[in-house]
């Protein structure tokens, strides 16, 4: 059976952020599903709930699993929710997992500060889009620049989504994950805060740090991330033995 890939976007963005990865996988004839979480993309008119996000991931994974083993990849908020999902006590049908830009525990002062900054940014004229566009223009390559916001920006869901992350029991979930796992961070990613803790909780996981890259690793270095997807797919195809990456490469 052919390996299937399910992709989960980060906060404010949508399934369109994965266009470079989806195109790459389709060129390899690998079935891929990039989902929109509640309150995001094509579901912008819905309310974001953590339960709804987990249900959305579960539905996509189980549909994919009917056709083959599943590689699940999540970015940022999507990665955090996916950690909770993959590490559930009732183990889901996931055969390999890539958690990108999400090695931070979303609680306490850090989360409160992030929410405060996000609300302040959202209160700016044009909801801060002039600054967002300048940053993206300066950091993303032309091939992915249009993809990141093509599904719209989920401004209204942002604070609710951030608040909901505080109830995640990521440490317990990380201990339970028993499939090949990769933590992928940009060198300058602000969410590397608890990177060492995540590695201690998942000692068999690989850590990949992409040089000269920020939080938006999938869009800034699409070919690198595509290669990591290829690695995960090859690992599943050869029977689930994780190999091929240095822990600190």
Image (cartoon, rainbow, N blue to C red):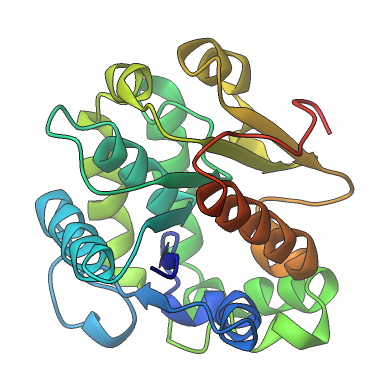
Q: Would you identify the image quadrant in which residue 134 lies? A: bottom right
Q: Would you identify the image quadrant in which residue 45 lies? A: bottom left
Give the quadrant of the N terminus: bottom left
Name the residue at 36% across, 70% down: 155
Name the residue at 41% across, 55% down: 72
- In the rendered view, would you say 206 is above or below 211? above
Residue 216 visible, this angle: no
Where residue 165 appears, as percent x and y from the top left, is: 28, 39
Where residue 71 appears, as percent x and y from the top left, is: 44, 56
Name the residue at 66% across, 61% down: 230
- In the rendered view, would you say 178 is above or below 15? above
Residue 91 visible, this angle: yes
105 sits left or right of 187 in the view: left
170 sits left or right of 229 in the view: left
Depth check, front residue: 229 or 11: 229
- In the rendered view, would you say 69 is above or below 67? above
* Residue lying furthest right: 212
Name the residue at 27% across, 68% down: 37
187 sits left or right of 56 in the view: right
Where residue 149 appears, as percent x and y from the top left, is: 53, 82
Depth check, front residue: 85 or 228: 228
Depth check, front residue: 166 or 235: 235
Where residue 178 appears, as percent x and y from the top left, is: 38, 27
Total labels: the figure holds 0
Q: Would you identify the image quadrant in which residue 60 lies? A: bottom left
Give the quadrant of the C terminus: top right
């Amino acid at each position: 059976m052919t390996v299937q890939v399910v992709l989960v976007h980060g906060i404010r963005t949508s399934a369109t952020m994965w266009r470079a990865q989806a195109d790459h996988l389709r060129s390899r004839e690998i079935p891929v599903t990039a989902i929109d979480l509640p309150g995001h993309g094509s579901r912008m008119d819905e309310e974001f709930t953590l339960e709804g996000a987990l249900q959305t991931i579960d539905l996509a994974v189980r549909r994919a699993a009917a056709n083959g083993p599943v590689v699940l990849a999540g970015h940022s908020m999507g990665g955090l929710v996916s950690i909770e999902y993959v590490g559930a006590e009732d183990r889901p049908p996931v055969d390999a997992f890539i958690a990108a830009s999400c090695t931070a525990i979303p609680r306490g002062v850090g989360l409160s500060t992030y929410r405060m900054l996000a609300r302040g940014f959202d209160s700016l004229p044009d909801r801060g889009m002039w600054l967002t566009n300048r940053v993206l223009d300066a950091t993303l390559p032309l091939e992915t620049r249009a993809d990141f916001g093509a599904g719209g920006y989920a401004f209204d869901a942002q604070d609710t989504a951030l608040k909901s992350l505080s109830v995640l029991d990521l440490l317990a979930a990380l201990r339970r994950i028993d499939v090949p796992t990769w933590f992928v961070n940009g060198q300058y990613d602000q969410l590397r805060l608890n990177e060492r803790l995540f590695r201690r909780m998942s000692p068999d996981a690989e850590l990949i740090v992409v040089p000269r890259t920020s939080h938006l690793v999938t869009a800034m270095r699409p070919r690198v991330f595509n290669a990591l997807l290829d690695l995960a797919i090859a690992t599943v195809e050869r029977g689930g033995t994780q190999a091929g990456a240095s822990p600190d490469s």
